[in-house]
Image: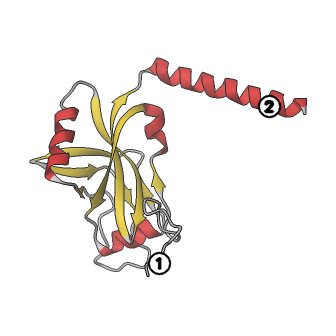
Amino acid sequence: MSKKTDKNPNSSDKYSPTIKNKKARFNYHLLQKLETGIALTGTEVKSLRQGRANLEEAYCRVNDGELFLVGCTISLYEHGNLVNHEPTRTRKLLAHRREIKKLQSKVVQKGLTLVPLRIYFTRGLAKVEIAIAQGKTHGDKRDKIKDRQVQRDIRQAMHRRR
């Protein structure tokens, strides 16, 4: 008899935080998402489990048929010793060769880039969700802010009306 669990396999582990790139959805139109693995050292994994990472300035790059995460800062592990990791090193992302080729062909197009959205753990393994994205114009960003303000005003008016 098989044991069923209510946990969604795509959700992050109960005890490990998800590191999100909050600015990505504001600065880019997200076209397509992909889940990749990430090659990490021991102290990097421990820092990620404590939620000590930053994706704000990070981006992905394809070099020689391999996918890399550049600009991601994973803070030093506070209980680490002399073999602690370098916080801003370039990390290799693990994806199938055909997926990398598809990503590379799309990135060559004008204005498209690879943006990391979040780092999370699934079944004990660190994963990075990346997206093919197109940069938003200044006008698009202004419109989004304006729409948010209108929605906020509507909610406040409805709340006061009760």
The numbered disc on residue 96 is: none
Horizontal side of 60 relative to 46 (left or right) equals left
User: Which one is nearer the viewer's eye here, 118 or 95?
Assistant: 95
User: Which one is nearer the viewer's eye here, 160 or 57?
Assistant: 160
Q: Secondary structure at mark 2?
A: helix
Horizontal side of 144 relative to 44 (left or right) equals right
The numbered disc on residue 156 is: 2
Residue 162 location, x and y as percent?
90, 34
Residue 95 location, x and y as percent?
22, 55
User: Which one is nearer the viewer's eye here, 76 or 24?
Assistant: 24
Instruction: Categorize mark 2 by other alpha carbons within 10 Å: few (<14), some (14-19), many (20+).
Output: few
Residue 70 location, x and y as percent?
27, 49
Q: Is residue 60 above or below residue 12?
A: above
Horizontal side of 58 relative to 93 (left or right) equals right
Instruction: Residue at 48%, 64% (x, y): give it.
Output: 51
User: Which one is nearer the viewer's eye here, 79 or 141?
Assistant: 141
Instruction: Categorize mark 1 by other alpha carbons within 10 Å: few (<14), some (14-19), many (20+).
Output: few
Q: Is residue 127 above or below residue 109?
A: below
The residue where tag 1 is placed is 3
Horizontal side of 27 relative to 103 (left or right) equals right
The answer for how far apart the CA atoms under marks 1 and 2 are is: 47 Å
> Which one is in front in this view, the residue at disc 1 or the one at disc 2?
1
Disc 2 marks a residue whose amino acid type is Gln
The N terminus is located in which quarter?
A: bottom left
Q: Is residue 143 above or below residue 16?
A: above
Instruction: Residue at 50%, 25% (x, y): give it.
Output: 141
**Cβ atoms under marks 1 and 2 closer than 8 Å:** no
Instruction: Residue at 28%, 71% (x, y): give it.
Output: 41
Disc 1 marks a residue whose amino acid type is Lys
The residue positioned farthest toward the top in the image shown: 139
Residue 91 location, x and y as percent?
25, 58
Instruction: Residue at 41%, 25% (x, y): give it.
Output: 136
